[in-house]
Amino acid sequence: MALKRSKKKKKGLKSLRSSGGSSSVETSPLRPVHVTKIPPCSNGCPQHNDIRQVLTTIGLAEKREVDQDKAFEEAFEILTRTNPLPAVLGRVCPHPCEDACNRKDKDGAVGFNSVERFLGDLAIEKGFEFKKLDDAGDYSEKIAIVGAGPAGVACAYHLARRGYKVTIYEAFSKAGGMLRYGIPAYRLPRDLLDAEIDRVLKLGVELKCNTSVGNDIPLDDLRKDYDAIFVGIGAHQGRKLGVDNEDAENVMTGAQFLHLVNSGEKVEVGKKVVVIGGGDTAIDAARMARRQGAEASILYRRTRVEMPAIDEEIEGAEEEGVSIDLLTAPVGIKADGGRATAMVFQKCELGEPDSSGRRRPVPIEGSEFEVEADFFVAAISQAPIFDGLEAVGNPKDWVKADKYMQAESAENVYTGGDVTNLGLVVDAMGHGQLAAETIHENFRSLSHDKGNNPPPIIGVDNVKMGFYEEAKVNERENLPVAERFSDPDVEITKGLDSVQALAEAKRCMSCGYCFECGECWSYCQDQAVIKPLTAGEKYKFKMEFCNGCKKCAEQCPCGYIEMHMPGEEPAYDKLS
């Protein structure tokens, strides 16, 4: 942890002490209280990973006299209390936690996503295994998971760790869902995906692939054999543009194109590929086309600001020669002999915001133009396929769920992931985790109530930025563009090594929780702060010596100490 050590020395007592040991002059009736606050990173994470504890476990290891390798293993254990796929999310998550980080206003957000990936890769290398929870039971209830995507795998993990019998039914030949069939291997190597899923299965989870619930097995049969069902079938059907000649043999949806390529099938794309869309699927499709030797261009109907794709992926596509034409919307396809020859576009300008919150593209009259190409990809959106699952959801409304991920349409059915609403991988895994908690609580007749008085989220105004030393972000390096196309599956982005991961963890400011800097002890001239003898233990207050001068609270850089009247200390709900 990069910080500035106080040079202030103790210069004796502030005032003479009475025989009772307290200061002869009382400055204030207020007294210091330790108040743990929610860090903005964890609040910004859909899984609510305990990011602060992961980072400080690594960053404070030397101070606490903990072996660094042991600290890495402990940090992995803390992280996987919520996230069973750290090597995966360390690669594909757009890290909203970093967008929320208080340190971004100083010298750049702490790169937790990089540390997450490091821990995930280290765990695979070292063979770390999952263990069941200490209070896990040997429960008789059985749960069926429909879909082995990120939501289903997360739900299975959290249930199996509690001691439930879980079976996953997957329609495709391998588990992973969109992680495998939607995200290219150059972003997510398949051996790492397999390793992390296999580690979940070792908890006793049974996986049945090539088994489509609703087709191979009726949903009603599962409802007879299982006590609960989680539906996480994802959204594997690409949406079409709704224009003439869209059924031409060289026109595909983005989901279809990526599924074929990621399944190892050869797709003849020719020399020039046009992709329509601005999301991650569009970016991935264009970059895959480049890896097959084609020129690739993306045409998107809004501006760069509105593009929903991850910024790093957009930049990567541009580095690889993908051209991006903005404010351009498709209006038709020209075809000859069953093959598309050109796509007709129309230039746009932005109007008022639509239901997505983005400004609506308005066509400019008389601005039509044609783009010729050998292959066309419509990557505008995706939807679930409900064959045989009509009792749970439908193409119009998808699957509706309450805030506990209980499906509204069927009893003892839970859901999550893209089948409810298109979102991030981390969103889907958060849904799976919440559904597992709800299933467990329902089975055990426990309350879903998590409290209604959570601790406050600590903002940038409540930490002392000047206390922390400047420290550059440890950036991940990308493979040179010239080396990316020799093998279409070669991973582009390198991970941090152990030295870099440690340095990045030390950049965490531990917002809202003590990181043992000792400032409260250094500034208290009345010996009211007791320094712990054992590293890692909390500083304590000797209230009979305290005169309420507030220096400990004023000097606490992470905002952990507050001043309150005795008996009026805040009583927040415990952090889970």
Image (cartoon, rainbow, N blue to C red):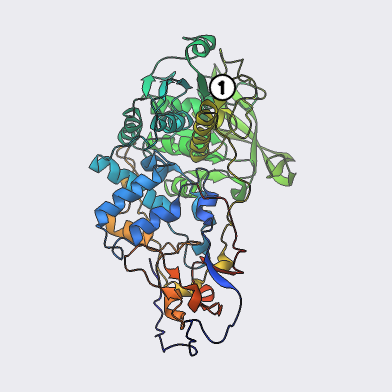
Nearer-the-camera pick, 452 or 368: 452
- Please determine whether, in this image, residue 140 is positioned above or below residue 485: above
Secondary element under disc 1, as helix, strand or loop, is: strand
- Please determine whether, in this image, residue 365 is positioned above or below residue 116: above
Nearer-the-camera pick, 194 or 292: 194
Nearer-the-camera pick, 178 or 558: 558
Residue neighbourhood size for the residue with mark 1, other residues' Cα within 10 Å, grouped as few (<14), some (14–19), many (≥20): many
Q: Position of residue 299 (x, y in %)?
A: 58, 40
Residue 270 appears in the figure = no
Residue 72 appears in the figure = yes
Nearer-the-camera pick, 428 or 68: 68
Q: Position of residue 24 (x, y in %)?
A: 54, 87
Q: Position of residue 281 (x, y in %)?
A: 51, 35
Left or right, 569 with respect to 112, comes to right
Q: Which residue is painted at 46% across and 80% down in the image?
A: 524
Q: Which residue is painted at 43% across and 28% down in the image?
A: 156
Left or right, 457 with respect to 473, comes to right
Q: Quadrant of the N terminus?
A: bottom left
Q: Position of residue 258 (x, y in %)?
A: 45, 29
Residue receiving disc 1: 413
- Please determine whether, in this image, residue 336 is positioned above or below residue 107: above
Q: Which residue is painted at 61% across and 15% down in the image?
A: 390
Q: Amino acid at mark 1?
A: Val
Q: Quadrant of residue 490?
A: top left
Count all numbered tags in the image, as a single digit: 1
Q: Which residue is painted at 51% across and 35% down in the image?
A: 428
